[in-house]
Every structure is written in C-alpha cells, then in structure tokens.
Image (spheres, rainbow, N blue to C red):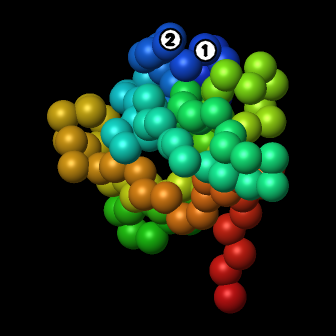
Amino acid sequence: MYVSDAGTGNSTDQTSHAGLQKWSLVNGTWQLDYVLGAGLIGTVDSNLFGYDGQYPDVTTIGLRDLAGVVDGDKVTLWATTSTSSASGDIGADPNKVVQIADDLRATSSNAVVNEAFSVLAGPTYGTVYRGVACVTP
C-alpha cells in the first residue's frame, strides 16, 4: 500500500515520513517498508513571477493526492506536492505534479536507491494542483 504524506507544513522540518510511504501487510500487521523522497523533499523552487511580481521561494515538504497503475512488477505513481513558503498561506503555494516508478517486490530502501521523483507539471505562479487521476484507454 502506498500513502502520500503531506508533511508538517514547516519547510525546516525534515520529517522522515513525509513523501511517499510504502507499507506491506506482514502476518496481519501493516509495516512501513520505506519512504520515497529523492528529488522531492526539500526541493526549493524560486523565480516564480506573475502579475503581482515575484512569489516567495516555495519548498516541497511532502505529497498530497495519489494515483497509480501497476504493470507487472512495477507501479507508476503520480501525486501533487505539498509546499511551504514565506507567503503565510500553507497549501496555497504553487505546487507540482510529480511521478515515480517503484519496484513492487522491494521491501527495503536499499533496493530502491535509484528511484527518484520527476516533475510533470509546475510550479507555475498562480496555479495550485489539487489532485491527480490515472485514466487508461
């Protein structure tokens, strides 16, 4: 099971569970396998300009929303980022739509060292992504 964790809302809090959590059901008990955050947590986006001028730097602190599709032993997941900035309005900052592929067989972060998030859209001044969906033909 994959869970998106939005983080604490504080860009200086590098919580170990913010990002994409992978959980496995083992003997009837859910256990956290690892958290994917490479290329995501702590990423700072700057130089966002719009009609009001420059927007404050935006720091990615976690993920919201989640969609995915399984293909054999791989799963591709899409999410929107949770961000923080000096704007004072947590959740209203420009954010991104990101993607990552994960090996379904992996149960340890040692097995996924090369997995990292890639940005599909954003950040864009004046735009906040509020969800993702996977549509298959």
Which residue is drawn at the image coordinates 64% and 26% (left, top)?
A: 85
Residue 109 pos. (x, y %): 26, 33
Q: Is residue 82 left or right of residue 91?
A: left
Question: Does 33 sit left or right of 44 as displayed?
Answer: left
Horizontal and vertical percent for residue 38? Answer: 34, 39
Categorize mark 2 by other alpha carbons within 10 Å: few (<14), some (14-19), many (20+): few
Q: Quadrant of the N terminus?
A: top right
Q: Nearer the viewer, residue 129 or 57?
A: 57
**Residue 33: image location, x then y, percent:** 38, 28
Q: Describe residue 19's horizontal placement relative to residue 83 as left or right.
A: left
Q: What residue is drawn where x is 80% and y is 36%?
A: 92
Q: Which residue is mark 1?
A: 10
Badge 2 marks a residue whose secondary structure is loop
- The residue positioned 67% from the left and 43% from the top of the image is 54
Q: Is residue 116 left or right of residue 97?
A: left
Contact (CB < 8 A) between labels 1 and 2?
yes
Q: Residue furthest front?
A: 53
Quarter of the figure with residue 106: top left
Disc 1 marks a residue whose amino acid type is Asn
The residue where tag 2 is placed is: 13
Gap between marks 1 and 2 measured at Cα = 5 Å
* Residue type for callout 2: Asp
